[in-house]
Image: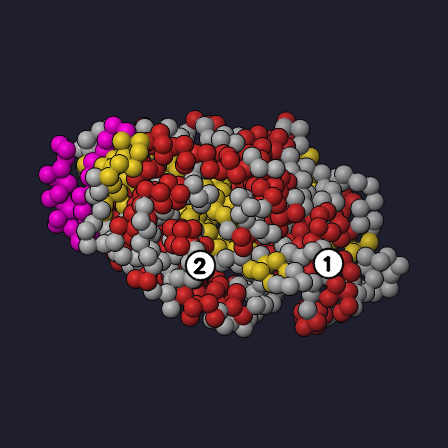
Amino acid sequence: MSTTTTNPDTAPAGVETAKKLGLLPDEYEKIIGILGRTPNFTELSIFSAMWSEHCSYKNSIKQLKTLPRSGPKLLAEAGEENAGLVDIGDGWACAFKIESHNHPSAIEPYQGAATGVGGINRDIFTMGARPIAQLNSLRFGDITKEQSSRWHMRGVVKGIGDYGNAFGVPVLGGEVYFDPCYTTNPLVNAMSVGIVRTDKVISATSHGVGNPVFIVGSATGKDGIHGASFASKDITATSMDDLPAVQVGDPFMEKLLLEASLELARTDAIIGMQDMGAAGITCSTSEMSAKGGAGMDIDLDKVPTRQQGMRAWEILLSESQERMLVVVKKGREKEVKAIFDKWDLNCVEIGTVTKGGTIRFFQQNELVAEVPAESLVLGGGAPVYVRESKEPTYIKENAKYDGARIDEPDDLRRVAYDLLASPNIASKRWVSEQYDTMVRTNNMSTNAPSDAGLVLIKETGKGLAVTVDCNSRYVHADPYTGAMIAVSEAARNIACTGGEPCGVTNCLNFGNPYDPEVYWQFEQAIKGMGDACRAFETPVTGGNVSFYNHTVTEKRNIPVFPTPTIGMVGLVPDITKRMSLDFKLKGDLLFLLGKSTDDIACSEYLVRHHKVERSPAPYFDLDEERRLHTMLLILIRKGLINAAHDVSEGGLWTTLVEMALPRGLGFDVITDSEIRPDAFLFGEGQGRAVVAVNEDEEVEFLDLMQASRVPFILLGHVTKGKIMVDDLPFGFIDDVRKVYEEAIPKAMAEQ
């Protein structure tokens, strides 16, 4: 390319420009080596976006490659397609993925969350899969104290609800947590799940010299420019200046794009298709070309735009929503255009596939950028780093914790009710009521709540169990064990529903990777996640890494708790054998499966009641966890239990309350005399679940349990509505319901 130009976009750009775009001096020199010349401004902008942490995973890819990437049901290599893909039998596959939209949601909660939902759904249907379920994992600051946290929560929940409801996919489940570390930097992780015929999967690839390249969907505007770079920086006092980087979504346009894409998928007219997410046209052209070993020539003048006079780099880096890139078989152009005309969508030929691996962009008949596709993509020419790592000092402080020195409360009933009022424990109905859970009429868990969301696959009669899980307090206390617990809780939720795990997607939310303590947390969490996934034979099919969830102020640098959110999909082979968590009948026997200990470490009870912030992760044993899951599936498939619910946040007390509430029943239980009552009721030791057993099934249930290696005890029985603990009255179910359901609405009513 000639370096003589009057166009500022094609003028040579130096190292100072590179630094302003977020590139390191060494990276600038590497770009010169790749191109064999000085890059121009447009090319440097391309490298800046594609080599940002958000796109290149340059500080995480080495660790990510240690995660298990193979399994009996895996159909697509992890990271090779827009989403993970697993075999669910009968010629069908499940496509699923989770991604973050944290930084945009921090400064513009409504659009940040809405476009996160839109982007993750496009990842599913660009593979030819119809989205059938959504989930989300949300983290905010203390909504009882911080007005800004209530603002974040209102905007995020409304954005998710408005976009998802208009798009027409049910929200099956999710989680919401609160902690001061998320005050400035909330986390918004969105998951989408879809199904597709295994012979109709569309790949994100490009090949065939002369094949036309089309942009379809919405027009390109100036929203979202440098969004990938924005996501690769800490939140600071000037982050609001980056507001133009937040995209604007249109769910109705996306619904049209979905239907057009699925109609297109039923033809054999296309080579490949990819969503335009982070870095827009730049990302889709380079990734599809690199995967297919081809190049592209793209005429930017042909790209439909919302504003006149958009510069080359603006068009290339725009992250305007509801757009996709499609490579069409030559000669089939009219067929493809007819489909998009039917749905009243743009479908414009903007380029062709070329020989070799170079992508070239033209504007006004001038070559404005020429870059090898492979040099831009994950695992290609992008730099790979391993940062300095150092164990945080607080880990040794946690080890000094001595649970025996914690005083037992005088009034267990008062503590129990106060725990239910904690936003982390209380009902999240304020959130879920803003989501449409019944659209498409395949949600099996709205009226029969279960530990995992359950969606009927109408085409096969099987069920998909889906869940998102992570207790970031555990991960902060011990990143290795905490990440194993996150995977295990997801698998436990699947098991309690009657399903077997198929695969995992993850959303890894951490602080600044240049902080050695943050990087240590990341390394340890990856190790824990990998070990647990291998134990449950759940390959990691993909996901995303979100670094820089780190608030920088004049006085402090505040990273969020390390939050490796696990999205898991499982299969329920016989939907008639699904299991819900609600008590069914007065008089049913209640059993606790799994080992109970005197452990209250890292529990909501320890933090909220005793104000103890420093403790290790709760009791956890991976082998015990696996045995529990196997036993739960045996009991469910033999029809020996009629309710199952895992013990997690809030301990056994919260588990029992959540099982009692759906049908307005109560419980009468006795604590274990060998364990202190507060630990038995409120401790969060892992590997446990409560099951309800009809008296007619008791003998067979006991025979099976006694032959197993899973510890169990009789807790008590289901009552008509009264709640008793150790023969002491704890009130009635309506008393509990009032506290449990009013806590979050009360907090959110504050101005």
**Badge number at residue 210:** none
Is 440 magenta? The answer is no
Q: Quadrant of the C terminus?
A: top right
Residue at label 1?
45
Question: Residue visible at 48% across and 27% down?
Answer: 439
Describe the element under mark 1 as helix, strand or loop: helix
| 1 or 2: tag closer to the N-terminus | 1
Residue name at image x 29 percent, y 37 percent = 730
- In-front residue for pair 63/476: 476
Q: Residue at x 30, y 39 (%)?
A: 656
Where is residue 415 shown, x and y percent of the image? 36, 45
Asked if 73 appears above or below 129 in the picture, the reply is below
Q: Is residue 310 left or right of residue 385?
A: right
User: Whole-percent x and y of residue 572?
Assistant: 32, 39
Q: Which residue is mark 2?
A: 613
Q: Is residue 467 above or below residue 407?
A: above
Residue extending furthest toward the front: 410
Q: Is residue 248 visible?
A: yes
Please name the amino acid that badge 1 sits on.
Ser
